[in-house]
Structure formats: C-alpha cells, structure tokens
Image (cartoon, rainbow, N blue to C red):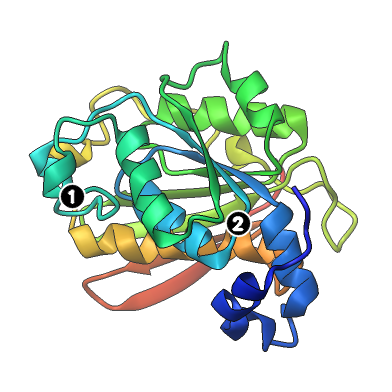
Amino acid sequence: MTTALTTDEIERYARHIVLPEVGGAGQQKLKQARVLVIGAGGLGAPVLEYLAAAGVGTLGIVDDDIVSLSNLQRQVIHGTDTVGMLKTESAKAAIARINPNTAVETHTVRLSAENAPALVARYDIVVDGSDNFETRYTVADACASARKPLVHAAVGRFDGSVTVLKPFEDGKDGRPNPGYRDLFPEAPPPGLVPSCAEAGVLGALTGVVGTLQAMEAIKLITGIGEPLVGRLLLYDALAARFETIRYGRR
C-alpha cells in the first residue's frame, strides 16, 4: 500500500493533519498501519469504528460469533438488519460505510493457542476486545512472543480498565516493561468473575473504554504522547472517576 495521501484523503483527515503532533507524516503512518482487533463486540465495535475513521490502512477482525439482538445494546457497529450475520461480515460492511479506504481482513475463527501466533504475526499492533481470560492470556502470550504491542481492556457492569503491553522493551528506567502475566499472574477460578451475560454491563461503558483503546492504538502508530505502558487506567462510570495504577515486572 502506498503511503502517499490522495486529495480526498487529505480532505477526509484534515482535522488530523492540522495537528502538529500528527500532521501528514502521522496520517501516512496510520494509512500504512495494520491493526488486529480481537472481537467485534462491545469493545471491538468502537475500536473498529474509530480506527477506520482515523484512516488505519488495514484492520483485521477475529470473531467467530453471529450478531444477536441482545448484542445491539452495546455493540454499535452492528444493527438490527445484521442480526443473524457473522460479526466479522457485519463489521466489515459497517467499516466500508465509514471509510472505504480501510481494507478489512476477516478471520472468522475462535482465537486459540494454535492459530494466534500466525494471526498476530501479520499485524503491527493488536487490540484485545475479548471477554474471557483464556483468550486474553493467549493473545498476550502471542504478542509478547512476536514482539507486537498489545492494547488490552476489560469491562464489567459499570467499571473498565485499559493498559498497553510491551514486555519485549525496556522502560525509561532501563527495566523490562511488564506483561499481562505480571498484572494478572493467573486466571481467577471458573465462576468467580461473572460474564456480561450473567452480571450485565452498561452499553455506553464499552463505548468509553473501547474508544480509549482506539486512542492508545493511534498513539502507538503515530508515536505521539505516552502510551499506558506499565499503567492500568481504571474507569468508574457511576462515580465519573478515572484512576491510574502503576505496575511493574514481577
């Protein structure tokens, strides 16, 4: 893919290009970027929408589920007319409406330890919007092994968290950055953490947290700001409060 911006792209991304921190060079980086999004659900929906709108050149989507009516309260990339469709195909159609310049690669599979390494290797950055610990550990391990930055998030009821994982690099202090297993050494026992279907989740919460994930991915691609490496951003929707916790390598 050529990184040169067309006349239409310059107009489309004008509000990015006018930012000195992004500019034409940053927009070209976005156009060249390949981002893999795990899950086209509550978190993946805003991630995909905003990365497409931002001009990310290629988006990969991993999801083996179909759109159901109960998804629509939070998975805003899908619509009533796509109920029953594969989420990968529904999301691909929505992205085409948002930005036809973004190429979409669909992977209608359930991520596993067997297929994760090959999938992750094809992309520059991975954004994890999965909803279970098994997939989170699998994604994190594959990204660490392939030396790919991972934007991780989780939500439940009225709370969410976001962090960026780059355990293959050293921090400003010269110490190795932490990985997912430093933050969560082992998964909680089955049944201890209820799923969204069991405990519920406020739809708008996934929009807030997923948009934060998209922001972190854009920062990583363009090289601006300070990504959430070694920092866990916590959001309490009911209290309208953000807190940041620092964590390190164990």
Q: Is residue 43 visible?
A: no
Question: How far apart are the alpha carbons under marks 1 and 2?
Answer: 23 Å
- Circle 1 SS class: loop
Q: Report whether 148 appears left or right of 189.
A: right
Q: Could you tell me which secondary element the residue under label 2 belongs to?
A: loop
Q: Amino acid at mark 1?
A: Gly
Residue 55: x %, y % from top left = 58, 62
> What residue is drawn where x is 66% and y is 75%?
7
Q: Position of residue 206 (x, y in %)?
A: 30, 57
Residue positioned most to the front: 7
Camera-side residue of 232 and 203: 203
Lateral position of residue 211 relative to residue 173, left or right:
left
Residue 239 visible within the image: yes
Question: Tag 2: Cα neighbours inside 10 Å, few (<14), some, or many (≥20)?
Answer: many
Quadrant for residue 36, please give it. top right
Relative to residue 21, is residue 57 drawn left or right?
A: left
Residue marked by disc 1: 79
Do callouts 1 and 2 mark residues in contact (Cβ within 8 Å)?
A: no
In the rendered image, the residue lying farthest to the top is 114
Q: Residue at x 21, y 72 (%)?
A: 238
Q: What crowding class fits label 1: few (fewer than 14 Cα within 10 Å), some (14-19), or many (20 or more)?
A: some
162 vs 9: above or below: above
Residue highlighted by disc 2 = 56
Asked if residue 94 lies left or right of residue 148, the reply is left
The amino acid pointed to by label 2 is: Val
Of the image marks 1 and 2, the number of the one nearer the N terminus = 2
